[in-house]
Amino acid sequence: MSITKNSVLAVLTALLILLSMLAVAAGDSSSSLVINEFMADNDAAVGGPYMTFPDWIELYNSGSASVDLSGMYLTEDLSSISWQFPNGTVVAPGSFLLVWGNRGSGAGMLHTNFSPNANGGALTLLSTDGASIIDQISFGKQLRDVSYGRLPDGSSTWSYILNPTAGEANMENPRTGVSSDWPVWVFIALSLAVCVLIVLSGRVRGRRKNDG
């Protein structure tokens, strides 16, 4: 059976398509990984190793496959990228990974050589090449013992979280039971009170004038 030129081209084309599909699949796994929550001013909210309260960063894998972070970078400063995830760091699908700040050293625990800036800044998760951005979040001034995270997990909506959930699913802030329209009602009540005072003061002036 002779091998024609067209059959060779067909085989090569099929191999190229297969390799492309594998490359896309590999890329998709890391794209499911996001910076999900962090705390930049942990005074007494979330206890770390050795009775300390280091700042922390939480990652979340929203995909259906495990993601290997070995050799990836996490940084607060793109001009000085120095901290890498150690080999064997894997996040299972639907799971969270907690990374402590530079005061969070402890046996078997991940800890960076930096902490998020409580006055505002950025956090960036980079691929193993140190240049390709997997996820990035810019943020403003942070509140003491209040975390900042996605609600719900993996979404594009960020919010301050009064009850931090390091390493667990993020929770909506508890409802206060006060209507969100309360400023409007306060304004109406104050306006009515002012009107009543004006009417009463007018009547008082009228009576004084009549008495005089």
Image (cartoon, helix red, strand yellow):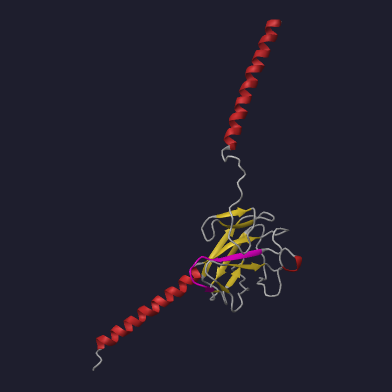
Q: Is residue 176 above or below residue 172?
A: above
Residue 212 spot, x, y in % from top left? 71, 5
- 116 horizontally vs 91: left or right: right
Q: Is residue 65 covered in magenta? A: yes
Q: Is residue 54 above or below residue 14?
A: above
Q: Is residue 22 covered in magenta? A: no
Nearest the viewer among 171 and 32 is 171
Residue 4 spot, x, y in % from top left? 24, 90
Q: To which quarter of the image does residue 142 belong?
A: bottom right
The stretch of residues the image draws in magenta is 56-67
Q: Is residue 79 above or below residue 175?
A: below
- Picture residue at 29% right of the left edge, 87% below the top: 8
- 45 horizontally vs 11: left or right: right
- 64 horizontally vs 18: left or right: right
Question: How many labels, in total?
Answer: 0
Q: Residue furthest right?
A: 51
- Picture residue at 69% right of the left edge, 61% below the top: 46
Which quadrant, please, contains the N terminus?
bottom left
Residue 84 spot, x, y in % from top left? 61, 75
